[in-house]
């Protein structure tokens, strides 16, 4: 156990050199890395704090915006619902009006159709009745009925109103008027003469040509045409007049 | 070679007037090993550390935490290279004796005395650097100048104790292992070698911790004086 001064001195120097070596090649680099890492961690923590603050700010902003959006949405929804109610009421009124119009239209059409059907039924009934009456009167017609109709014609000539007589008289004065007497049964000379006398007595002597002919379609009676005028006293015309008069109603 | 004294270090060769002993050569080996390890580690330093870098950072962080418990951060930065080098070197130097054919440098009183002397000087160096020469020297006169001789004796004895404690423990371990090997055979010293590991770590810790305590005492003596004066 003795002290070797050379070793002592070398150990002092060695240790000082070792301190320098380790400080230069070990402590300083490692401490720098640790410090750099801590700076990086602090920076990342600051960055994370900033991002968290920004995120919180954004969250607050978005929540506020969501609240605004919710309010706007509710307002828009309320407005839409109100608009829908108004539109619904408007549409319902329009629909009611349209339904009323359609109802009136259909009622009018139904009425018109019913009228048309009734008129058609009446026409058919009248035609049927006219046909039936025509067949019945054709069966019942005969010289007696014919004579009575001719007599009725002569009697009615006496009761014609003045306006009608004036028009007939005007027709008689036309140039070369043709007076045609159509009868259901053939007329003998006396019957023709009686008719001519009755007419000339009421409307004056005729300058035209008299023509007598037979038409069994008349069933009974006669029809006289003077120029543009017709005088009826036969069953066929009466039936037609009856039918047309019914239509006119 | 000093073959007659088993407690002395063998001189391997002479560099002029300087005798290079086994202790110095082993110390150079330890220094070379630490330098190479540092260079290798420094090449691969990254912010995302690997296992070796993590271990190295763990060692430095642990030492810095221990120092930081006693000193201010600024003082800790100044003291860390010295104290950390003490710990690292002493651990390796104490464990070198486990390698067959090698002896721990700390089993040589010259080496431990050198380290103790450096601790002694570093205490004053850091104290004067922190407080100034007058303020630092004044603490030897407190609480009364009568205690100056005791302060001086304390400085010397604790330095001697530092050197002898480490030397005695490591040398005795190696000697015990050698004696057991001579007496009992090849595998008999194994328990002693395992004890050597524990003792090497403990002695390195004690030496470094005492050095740190001494340095901290030197640094804080003036502060304590100022606090007393303030009171």
Image (cartoon, coloured by chain):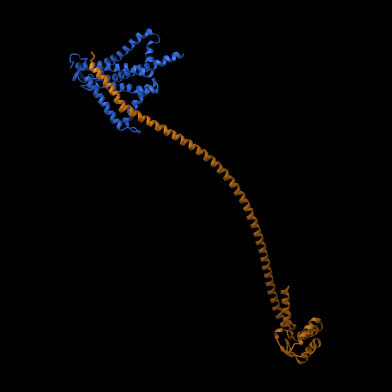
In the image, residue A229 lies at what x, y percent?
74, 83
Query: Which colour is chain A painted?
Result: orange
The residue positioned 73% from the left and 76% from the top of the image is: A245
- Relative image position of residue B67 (x, y in whole percent): 37, 21
Q: Is residue B195 above or below residue A231?
A: above
The image shows residue B79, relative to residue A64, as above or below, that is above
Q: Nearer the viewer, residue A123 or A139?
A: A123
Residue B138, percent across and down? 38, 12
Chain with colour blue in the figure: B
Quarter-of-image position of residue B8:
top left
Q: Can residue B98 be seen in this snapshot?
A: no
- Residue A98 relative to residue B116: left or right: right
Q: Place residue A45 in its image quadrant.
A: top left
Residue A61 is situated, as x and y percent measured from the top left of the image, at 52, 39
Q: Which residue is situated farthest in the top direction here?
A: B146
Residue found at the far bottom of this picture: A189
Relative side of B151 to B194, left or right: right
Q: Nearer the viewer, residue A122 or B10?
A: B10
The mark tally for this picture is 0
> Is residue B74 something that shows in the picture?
yes
Using residue A153 as the reference point, say whether residue A57 is left or right of it: left
Residue visible at 27% across and 17% down in the picture: B114
Q: Residue at point 37% right, 13% down?
A: B137
């Amino acid at each position: 156990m003795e002290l070797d001064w050379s070793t002592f001195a070398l150990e002092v120097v060695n240790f000082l050199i070792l301190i320098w070596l380790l400080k230069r090649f070990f402590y300083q680099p490692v401490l720098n890395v640790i410090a750099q890492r801590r700076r990086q961690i602090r920076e990342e923590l600051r960055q994370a704090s900033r991002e968290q603050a920004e995120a919180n700010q954004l969250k607050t902003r978005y929540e506020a915006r969501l609240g605004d959006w919710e309010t706007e949405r509710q307002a828009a929804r309320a407005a839409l619902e109100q608009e829908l109610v108004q539109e619904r009421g408007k549409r319902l009124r329009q629909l009611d009006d349209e339904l009323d119009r359609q109802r009136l239209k259909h009622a009018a059409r139904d009425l018109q159709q019913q009228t048309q059907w009734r008129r058609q039924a009446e026409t058919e009934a009248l035609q049927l009745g006219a046909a039936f009456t025509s067949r019945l009167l054709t069966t019942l017609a005969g010289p007696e009925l014919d004579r009575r109709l001719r007599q009725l014609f002569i009697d009615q000539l006496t009761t014609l109103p003045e306006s009608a007589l004036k028009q007939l008289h005007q027709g008689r004065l036309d140039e070369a008027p043709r007076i045609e007497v159509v009868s259901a049964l053939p007329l003998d000379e006396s019957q023709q003469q009686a008719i001519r006398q009755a007419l000339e007595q009421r409307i004056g002597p005729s300058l035209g040509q008299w023509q007598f002919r037979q038409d069994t379609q008349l069933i009974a009676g006669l029809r006289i045409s003077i120029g543009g005028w017709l005088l009826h006293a036969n069953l066929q015309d009466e039936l037609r007049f009856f039918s047309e008069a019914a239509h006119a109603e | 070679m000093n073959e007659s004294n088993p407690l002395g270090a063998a001189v391997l060769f002479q560099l002029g007037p300087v005798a290079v002993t086994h202790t110095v050569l082993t110390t150079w080996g330890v220094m070379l090993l630490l330098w190479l390890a540092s260079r290798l580690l420094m090449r691969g330093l990254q912010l995302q550390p690997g296992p070796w870098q993590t271990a190295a950072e763990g060692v430095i962080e642990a030492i810095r935490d221990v120092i930081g418990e006693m000193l201010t951060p600024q003082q800790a930065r100044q003291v860390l290279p010295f104290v950390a080098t003490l710990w690292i070197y002493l651990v390796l130097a104490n464990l070198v004796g486990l390698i067959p054919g090698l002896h721990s440098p700390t089993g040589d009183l010259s080496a431990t005395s050198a380290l103790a002397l450096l601790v002694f000087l570093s205490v004053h160096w850091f104290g004067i650097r922190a407080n100034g020469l007058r303020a630092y020297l004044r603490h030897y006169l407190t609480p009364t100048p009568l205690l100056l001789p005791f302060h001086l004796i304390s400085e010397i004895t604790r330095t001697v104790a530092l050197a002898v404690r480490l030397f005695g423990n490591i040398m005795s371990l190696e000697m015990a292992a050698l004696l057991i090997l001579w007496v009992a055979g090849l595998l008999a010293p194994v328990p002693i070698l395992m004890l050597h590991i524990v003792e090497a770590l403990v002695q390195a810790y004690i030496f470094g911790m005492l050095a740190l305590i001494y340095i901290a005492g030197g640094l804080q003596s003036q502060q304590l004086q100022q606090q007393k004066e303030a009171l």
